[in-house]
Structure formats: C-alpha cells, structure tokens
Amino acid sequence: MTEGLTFSDPRLAELDGFRVTLDAANERADIVLDRPPYNVISMEARDQLRLVFEALDEDDRVRIIVLSGAGEHFSSGGNIKGFLEATPEHVSKLAWNVAAPARCTKPVIAANRGFTFGVGFELSLACDFRIVSETCRYALPEQKLGQIPGSGGSARLQKIVGVTRTKDIVMRSKRIAGQQALDWGIATECVPDADLEQVVSDLVTELRGFSPMAQRTAKKLLNDTEDALLTTAIELEGLNYSRLRQSDDFREGVEAFHEKRKPQFTGR
C-alpha cells in the first residue's frame, strides 16, 4: 500500500508485507513493515524495499526516510522457509538489497521496538540513526538455524562494537536489549516505548533544518571513509569541505549566523 506516492516500477504495484506513506508537508516518507504480528520480511519484500529506497532517493518531495514496524515488533526476521526455496542467484542479492538504506543519499531513521531480529536488525544497521524503545531486542539468531548472518549483519556490527562483542552476539545468538544497545553504541537513542514516535518525529524536524547538500555530503563521506586510513579520511574530508564552501547553502548559513536568523537552505 502507498499513500501519496506512485511508483513507476511495475514490481512495486503490490507491496509484499509493508506500506509506504508520504507526508509532503514535512518532507517525510515512511516505510512501515506490516505483516502482523511479527512483520516477517519475505524474499520478495527485500527486492521491493531496495526499489522503494531507490525511488524515494530520487523523489524531491522527500528529505527524510523513516523505517518502522507496525505493532509491538519491528520484525522477527526473514521468512525461514524462503531461504530453502530461493535460488542461489536470488540469495546472492540479499546483502545488496538490505544495504539500500546505507546507499540512499538521504538520512534514514530506523524506529525499533520489540523483536528486531535477523534481517530486521540488518536493515536497521544499514540506517543512519537507530532510535529504540526500551522494549527493543536486537538479535542475529542465525546460529540456531546452522547459519550465519548473510546480509551484512555481522560485518556492520563488528564495525560498531568490535570483534569481541560481535562474537558474543553472533556466535551465541544473543539478544541485546535497547538500553544495552545504546550503551554499546548500536542505538542512537533509547526511549520509553510510548515516546518512540514523538522522538522520531522530533529527529525528522531537526534534520530538516540542516542543508540537504551538507547532509548528503556528510553521509557519503562517513560511509566512504569507514575503512579508510586516517590520512585518506582527512584528505577526503578536506576536499568535501572545500567543495561545500562554494555552495549557496554555505553562504546562506554564514549570512544567517551573522544576521542572527534561521538559515533557509535550498540544497544548492
């Protein structure tokens, strides 16, 4: 289901287990996993989610994308039986599909509550911000199936928490509560369950106040330099800083600062 949006790709004519809505007034798009009660993510949905992220990235009405789950849980993970039915070619594309939030040039916020397991956790790890409720439980339970995470989960997690904690989570299929996820640097913020939507909305409003160009640049720079040498990262940072100095948004930001007013950024 889509509200306020029309996708040209025929593969998105009927969405499998999720819906997409547009709040044009707030430049916000919501992708809501909606297959009650646990929002299991099918193989087809992974393909469609990638296509939706790509379409929203090209939509000028959208500044911020929020990924959430309907009900008490974000997602208990993937359709287990689907792994045995999928072709090797299809399975080989899973990590590329799940990485769509990271490739998206716009800020992506994951709102996590309840079970956030398997591919649900992996999708969230590919987002820029993870706002979790106190009910959130992160897990990569693939060891219980005789498998390992296959869509970037262990790799992304190791970058965040290090190899020791990643082994503890992956090799024991350990569940991590929301507050612990915050303490370990996995979550951006942990809030009472009743406050989750409001905190996410406040973050959307905050992010909309910055220059779209500066945010796109910051996201790409941080993603591109995650594995870089410090000297390389500093060089790339300087080059991007120099490029932004030529932008209209930077000039507007400086002028607004001196005039003690709120800047009106245009993304140019």
Image (cartoon, grey):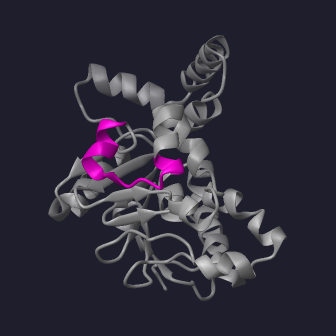
* Residue at 62% over, 27% down: 225
State the residue in front, 175 or 106. 175
State the residue in front, 225 or 266. 225
Corner quadrant of residue 95: bottom right
State the residue in front, 61 or 261. 61
| Residue 144 left/right relative to 259 | right
The quarter of the picture where the C terminus appears is top right
The span shown in magenta is: 169-184
The furthest residue to the bottom? 14
* Residue at 63% over, 87% down: 13
Corner quadrant of residue 73: bottom left
Task: Mark yes or no: residue 7 visible.
Answer: no
Q: Magenta segment: does it hold 177?
A: yes
| Residue 108 left/right relative to 155 | left
* Residue at 66% over, 62% down: 97
State the residue in front, 261 or 163. 163
Percent x, y of residue 31: 46, 70
Percent x, y of residue 79: 58, 78
Percent x, y of residue 104: 59, 52
